[in-house]
Image (tube, rainbow, N blue to C red):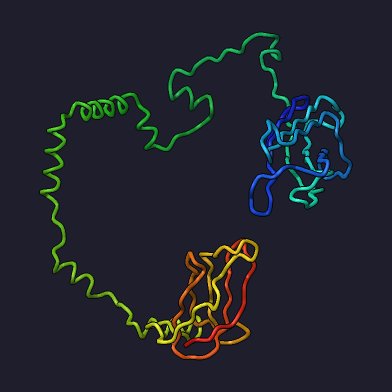
Amino acid sequence: MEVYQAGETVYWQFNTRDGDGAPITFAGSPAVAVRKDNGTTTDTDGVTLTVDSGSVTGLHTLSIDTSQDETFYATGHEFFVIVTSGTVDSTSVVGEVVHRFRLGEVPADVQAWDGGAVPSLTPLSSIADILEDTGTTLPAAIALLATAAALSALDGKVGGLNDLSAAEVNAEVDQALADYDGPTKAELDSGLSGLSIPTVTEINTELETEHGAGSWGAQGSYTITPTTPLTNSETGAAISGMIVKIYSDSARTEIITQETSDTEGSFTAHVTAPGTYYLRATKEGYQDLEWTEVAS
């Protein structure tokens, strides 16, 4: 949420789009107003709405001069800009919130508060001074590092590292690799021999216990494909990425398998027996589809 100071001008830009997501103008005598906190009364003082700002369709500019009503636009309150009139793609959008902001506290002018003098800060000369000033006690290990001798020694070691040549670094790496004694194949095989790897039958049994009976193992010899591709009812375009679950019962509680539609809105599911199956297709942004297909 944007935070402004009382008396400032709030600027905001927002868009309007049609059902397909394309920019569209804000029609129907568009107008907005401002609500404060959880109140229901509105204020339009200082509010300016520019539709299709800069001749850009669907891009609108909002400005609110909060100095025009100091009683309404008071510090410490939240404000909501709502549509009071207008349509988008022939649909009323009255009540839509297009912006939210808060008027915060005005920061203190320290220089003016101190009689016009710029406050001065006296730097603390050491870590000990900082600890004393803040009443802080360091753990013993950290306190040891904070001593001048420890810092000097650390600086010497770092300096030594900085002086290493590329050849010296490579030599150290080569020696480290030569010293490394990795496990042999026999040692790896011995370590893996103790692992218990489940069989396909055990995996299928676990899946059936968790999710019910179904063709969890090898693919069945019968297939299901959609009689017609999955398409957008408005545009006719194929819908890819829909999750299609195949059930054995009309209540759709016993799932057999699932597939995902391809770029042509189609899929192929394998089952172990012929007959009628019950399908449900889902995808975010689309209405769920339910229908039946025959496996052959």
Whether 13 is drawn above or below 260: the answer is above
Q: Position of residue 103 (x, y in %)?
A: 75, 32
Whether 126 is drawn above or below 34: the answer is above
Q: Quadrant of the N terminus?
A: top right
Q: Most extreme residue toward the bottom, as rendered?
A: 274
Q: Is residue 274 left or right of residue 280?
A: left
Q: Position of residue 190 (x, y in %)?
A: 18, 72
Count of numbered circles on the image: 0
Q: Nearer the viewer, residue 71 or 44?
A: 44
Q: Nearer the viewer, residue 135 or 110?
A: 110
Within the image, what quadrant is residue 2 found in? top right
Whether 115 is drawn above or below 128: the answer is above
Residue drawn 78% across and 24% down? 7
Q: Is residue 217 left or right of residue 32?
A: left
Q: Position of residue 25 (x, y in %)?
A: 72, 42
Q: Is residue 52 left or right of residue 230?
A: right
Whether 245 is drawn above or below 141: the answer is below
Q: Position of residue 258 (x, y in %)?
A: 49, 76
Residue drawn 48% across and 73% down? 267
Q: Nearer the viewer, residue 54 or 141?
A: 54
